[in-house]
Amino acid sequence: MSQIIGIQNLNHYYQEGKKQKQILFGIDLQIEPKEVVILTGASGSGKTTLLSLIGCMRSVQEGSLKVLTHELKGANEIQRMQIRRRIGYVFQHFNLLDFMTVEQNVMVSLELQENFSHSQARNQSREILTAVGLGQHLDAYPRDLSGGQKQRVAIARALVHRPRLLLADEPTSALDRQTGREVTELMTRLAKEQGSAVLIVTHDSRIFSASDRIVRMEDGKLDIDYQGQLSIALPTLTDKQLFELIPQLKMLTFPPGEIVIRQGELADKFYILIEGEVEVIQELPNSKSKLLKTLGPNTYFGEIGLLQETKRTATVRATTDAAIKVLVIERYDFYQMVVTSKMTHALLNYQAIKSLLIRKFKTSYYKSMTN
């Protein structure tokens, strides 16, 4: 399946008097179908500029930016408008039309599309409004709704035409903690069900766990948000513990099919998977092996051997279809982490015991089937 967003060496400039000021520096970013990516960064770091370029609101100046397989470098306004129609947008302040009902606010998004009749727009709007829990509020006006309900209408409006890409700009800034999390989870779930990719610009760390990946913009340059990624994989770490751990992290990339850890080797590192998938394999006698499980982004491995201070109990390798990126924590730093965070120690122990019990059951089942 084709990438939804593909960016290579993207640069962007603003004119300040007679001088040009560079805002974006060599941006590289790829987003796949059904992937949810959060973009963080301080105000003025370039987030809004990047979002507006991806959303076809500005012309691409330097580099390559492909959205839905279309190259935007050199695209004219008509071409950008055609792509915009295939993108869904969720705004910070809802941007609902006060003189229209909930149903009409959603329908208008479809009526701007080509080849949609009024009856089709109404039926599809009612379907998505029911999906966001507002099927009983079709005739209500925005003034009658809570903040969370308004954002649900905005989500319905953005998704009603089933876009391949959903862009959300600070979607929780006007919402309380619980409501913000609920609408974010709703938005990402519905988008994934449609096969859409989601890019969310936010400062709200409370919704980080709803993402597959977090990237950070700083002074116009894009990098992985290490603190955000760690907080998803290990939610029991405090901000102070995360801050202290970040300088010790290493980022490694493994090509498709490459072995990361091998069964029987001494356990010396802990791994957090950032991109791609890995297979956990148990080596059996007579050169046989069996697949125990497949892990995706924001999961971890390597903790069992470290916690038991023993050798690796399984082999972990990158799947054959794509390279992987992992954050690596050395043995000493891993022990420091579990000593200073009892909750993290308990979480890792629980997951290790759970994995070993499942592995033991699968091994017993395998033996019974082969005897």
Image (cartoon, rainbow, N blue to C red):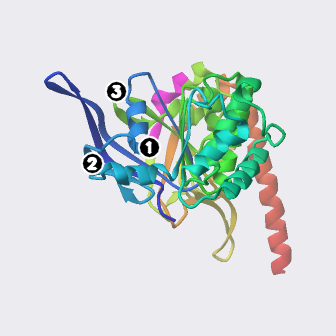
Q: Main secondary structure of the magenta part?
A: helix
Residue lying furthest top in this view?
Answer: 240
Question: Which residue is at the front of the view, 95 or 19?
Answer: 95
Instruction: Find out whether residue 29 is within the magenta segment.
Output: no
Q: In the structure shown, which secondary structural element does the residue marked by tag 2 occupy?
A: strand
Which one is closest to the eye, mark 3 or mark 1?
1
Q: Where does the image place residue 206, in percent across and percent down from the top left?
A: 65, 28
On the rendered structure, is 9 left or right of 252?
left
How far apart marks 3 and 1 lie (CA) works out to 21 Å
Q: Is residue 367 visible?
A: yes
Left or right side of 338 for 3: left
Specify start and end residues of the magenta stretch as a single range: 243-251
Residue at the disc numbered 1: 55
Residue 219, numbered circle: 3
Specify which label sits upstream in the sequence, 2 or 3.
2
Mark 3, Cα crowd under 10 Å, few <14 / some 14-19 / many 20+, is some
Circle 1: residue type:
Gly
Mark 3 is on which residue type? Asp
Q: Nearer the viewer, residue 3 or 352?
A: 3
